[in-house]
Image: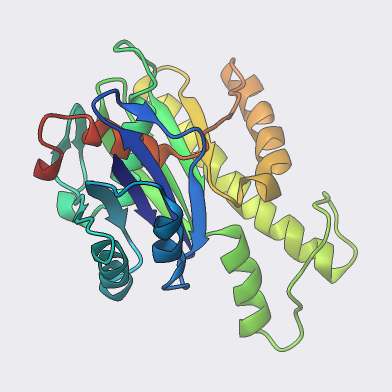
Amino acid sequence: MILLIDSGNSRLKVGWLDAPAAAREPAAVAFDNLDPDALGDWLGTLGRTPGLALGVNVAGPERGAGIRAALARHGCPVHWVTSRARLLHLRNGYTQPSQLGSDRLVALLGVLGRLPQDHAPFVLASFGTATTIDTVGADNEFIGGLILPGPALMRNSLARGTANLPVADGQVVDFPLDTHRAIASGIAAAQAGAVMRQWLAASQRCGRPAQLYVAGGGWPEVQAETEMLLALAGKAAGQPPAPVYLDRPVLDGLALLAGQPDPLSF
């Protein structure tokens, strides 16, 4: 049994792979990544001990050390995957490849694992604490991406950084007439506009419509606005994109690495 760990800023997502049959878990589990005991407590409920944990950690060294300690109490070592110029068949075009977030690179690998060899370029938009919108060409090269605050971070930063704005909970409308809806609509417009920008840029650069994949807990909040804008943009470009939601693309990518002859080499 190999654990697959996605340690993000807010949530700790855990899947597993049963070797050598390579069967994935039916449903991953998630914990508050600020709770140092949650992972260890869950491991204690399992009827067996994992032989290895393979993961990515973008929550900082202290969080990574806490995860390592929790696993060590159950006799399970952890190996953190790092970004590099090439990860299996995915090429990393970042100016300094090691600076690309390992979760972003592994998530893109997880998308590639679903696609045939002759695939269209694609955009992966992940709506978490931060929103990242990354593009991979038909030649399997990561050609760049955006980072912006995620929906919840946008909302909370407005409440913290201003004297009179609340933590908004409103409907998304075209012409808001109250503060809650004004904030909710502004957040949705910013997120959807960024996705539309990258989809148009990817389609133009690659000379064909890009596929669009979305992930993350913030997606439902901006889904309607994003789909509406993309439909409008797609009509102008000749082929409206249909976003495909992926539940755990980082864990999908980790599963591909865990299935390799030497998963510790990544």
- In the image, residue 169 sits, relative to residue 14, either above or below, namely below
112 over 60 or under it: above or below: above
Which residue is situated farthest in the front direction here?
A: 47
Q: Nearer the viewer, residue 103 or 147?
A: 103
In this rendered view, identify the residue nearer to me: 155 or 252.
252
Q: Please tell me whether residue 196 is drawn above or below residue 244 in the rendered image.
A: below
**Residue at (59, 50) in percent of width and height:** 217
Is residue 101 something one can see in this rendering?
no
Q: For the point 29% across and 23% down, which residue is it? A: 21
Q: Is residue 37 visible?
A: yes
What percent of the width, then of the height, locates residue 33? 45, 66
Residue 177 pos. (x, y %): 90, 63
Is 69 left, or right, of 120 in this rendering? left
Colour mapping:
rainbow
> In screen coordinates, is 24 left or right of 186?
left
- Count of numbered badges drawn on the protein: 0
Which quadrant of the view contains residue 57?
Answer: bottom left
> Where's residue 3, x and y in %?
32, 46
On the image, the x and y values in percent for residue 64 come to 28, 67
Closest to the observer, 189 or 67: 67
Task: Name the residue rendered at 76%, 85% in the picture.
Answer: 164
